[in-house]
């Protein structure tokens, strides 16, 4: 497919890298010569330096022959105008990252169709939803949902005293109550592996689990996670995402507060919120931490626009007694560092945006994609009568070594995959795959007629 990406930041670069690797014909536009130099030096794509709001620049990038435009600059207005211009050039599919909720919330003035956009991705919405789910699930460090919320992906740390620590995967498979729970990936010393039956779960591991929604409360005791009420949440940073998150949290949590260094932002946030207390101060103010009793905080959420401020504030909050800390970091290079220094939870908005876009680009009937921090993907794939694996037993499917089927959803019920399970038309299959296996999986599940019709 011929794809034009506008914006060569972290999101644009990752999309260009991912999609060019998969054989798509990629062009990318950005005004920053340094970013474009990096693109030209590392990727086999057409790079055009210039303002994508100018039709002449779009034409230099080959807009007349482009089948899809993905506008992911830092400016909503640019992304909107690019999609509008792309529609004038008859580009069939148009994606835009829009951060302002006025364009994407339920009561928006203009429909996406009126804005010449097929799909809008608002990272803020996804971040808020993710954090609310993390707070409501004890011990979880990452969340995603498939099959319209019936099948959950949850990542947990394995403590020393976890009942499943020291057990082989095959031992867990033998427990009758485990038919609604599968370990699909283990992260050990920063490296992700697709587990086999003989692998042993060790204390200190992080595990990704596929679990039936109704079974989640029964899974927690196996990980030695008890359900405790979250009574106090402290947020650092009063941007729009933070304020909207505080609105969502203050409905169920009795003590929600925000720390904001800018007096103007603090005042604006205080006007919007009803029960949440907004403090004017820095994320390193020890006296303020004492005044708000940081030692009682169940969660400290560092959500400001500055990665370094977030990291420092979260470390200090943990030192002052906050039970768990969550950090937003826009630079993916910080992710392994944060893991190595013991940060509880990290969220990367760029990865969230890439995941949201990729699900519309995968071949076949890929209905959802979740990109893991460790670069693997979890995909929900529908099976139709053209698929090459339909009516085959799992044992007969030549599945890549660095991938696995995590679960099947059939008529609303989750099925744990075994060698004798036969894949049927209408099934939704949850697949976990490392990057080198993705193309093979698409071939297994798809046929030429299943590829996107505008390829």
Image (tube, rainbow, N blue to C red):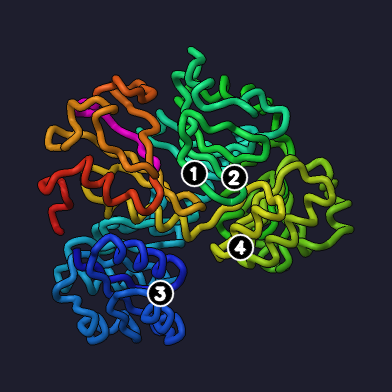
Q: Nearer the viewer, mark 3 or mark 2?
A: 2
Q: Which residue is mark 2?
A: 188
Q: Nearer the viewer, mark 3 or mark 1?
A: 1
Q: Position of residue 408 (x, y in %)?
A: 33, 28
Q: Secondary structure at mark 1?
A: strand
For image coordinates 34% across by 57% down, the residue present is: 120
- Residues in magenta, as a range: 423-432
Is residue 81 rendered to the left or right of residue 300? left
Q: Position of residue 105 (x, y in %)?
A: 41, 51
Q: Camera-side residue: 293 or 269? A: 293
Q: Is residue 427 magenta?
A: yes
Rounded to the nearest angstrom, the CA distance separating label 1 from label 4 is 21 Å
Residue 448 seen in this snapshot: yes
Crowding near the residue tagged with mark 4, few <14, some 14–19, many ≥20 C-alpha atoms within 10 Å: some
Q: Which residue is mark 1?
A: 193
Residue 252 seen in this snapshot: no
Q: Camera-side residue: 321 or 77? A: 321
Q: Secondary structure at mark 4?
A: helix
For the residues bearing labels 1 and 4, Cβ distance under 8 angstroms: no
Earlier residue among tags 2 and 4? 2
Q: Which mark is residue 8?
A: 3
């Amino acid at each position: 497919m011929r794809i034009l990406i506008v914006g060569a930041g972290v999101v644009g670069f990752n999309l260009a890298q991912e999609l060019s690797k998969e054989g798509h014909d990629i062009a990318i536009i950005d005004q920053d010569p340094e970013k474009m130099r990096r693109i030209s030096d590392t990727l086999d794509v057409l790079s055009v330096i210039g303002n994508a709001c100018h039709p002449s620049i779009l034409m230099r990038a080959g807009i007349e022959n482009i089948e899809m435009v993905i506008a992911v600059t830092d400016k909503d207005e640019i992304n909107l105008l690019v999609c509008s211009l792309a529609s004038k050039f008859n580009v069939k599919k148009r994606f835009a990252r829009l951060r302002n909720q006025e364009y994407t919330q339920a009561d928006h003035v203009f429909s996406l169709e009126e804005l010449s956009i097929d799909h809008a991705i608002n990272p803020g919405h996804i971040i808020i939803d993710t954090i609310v789910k993390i707070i409501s699930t004890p011990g979880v460090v990452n969340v995603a949902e498939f099959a319209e919320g019936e099948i959950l992906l949850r990542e947990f740390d394995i403590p020393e005293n976890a009942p499943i620590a020291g057990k082989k995967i095959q031992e867990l498979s033998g427990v009758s109550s485990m038919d609604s729970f599968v370990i699909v990936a283990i992260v050990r010393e920063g490296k992700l592996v697709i587990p086999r039956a003989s692998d042993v779960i060790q204390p200190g591991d992080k595990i990704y689990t596929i679990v039936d929604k109704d079974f989640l409360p029964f899974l927690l005791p196996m990980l030695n996670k008890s359900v405790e009420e979250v009574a106090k949440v402290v947020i650092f940073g009063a941007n729009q995402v933070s304020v909207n998150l505080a609105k969502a949290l203050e409905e169920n949590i009795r003590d929600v507060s925000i720390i904001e260094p800018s007096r103007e932002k603090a005042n604006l946030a205080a006007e919007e919120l009803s029960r949440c207390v907004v403090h004017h101060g820095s994320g390193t103010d020890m006296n303020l931490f004492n005044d708000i009793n940081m030692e009682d905080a169940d969660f400290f959420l560092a959500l400001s626009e500055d990665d370094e401020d977030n990291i420092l504030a979260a470390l200090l909050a943990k030192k002052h007694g906050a039970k768990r800390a969550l950090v937003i970091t826009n630079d993916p290079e910080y992710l392994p560092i944060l893991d190595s220094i013991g940060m509880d939870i990290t969220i990367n908005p760029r990865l969230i945006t890439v995941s949201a876009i990729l699900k519309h680009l995968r071949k076949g009937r890929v209905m959802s994609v979740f990109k893991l921090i460790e670069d693997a993907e979890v995909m929900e794939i529908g099976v139709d009568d053209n698929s090459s694996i339909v009516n085959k037993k799992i044992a007969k499917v030549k599945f890549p070594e660095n991938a696995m089927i995590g679960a099947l959803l059939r008529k609303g019920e989750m099925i744990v995959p075994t060698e004798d399970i036969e894949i049927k038309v209408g099934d939704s299959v949850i697949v976990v795959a490392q990057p080198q296996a993705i193309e093979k999986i698409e071939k297994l599940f798809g046929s030429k007629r299943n590829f996107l019709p505008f390829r």
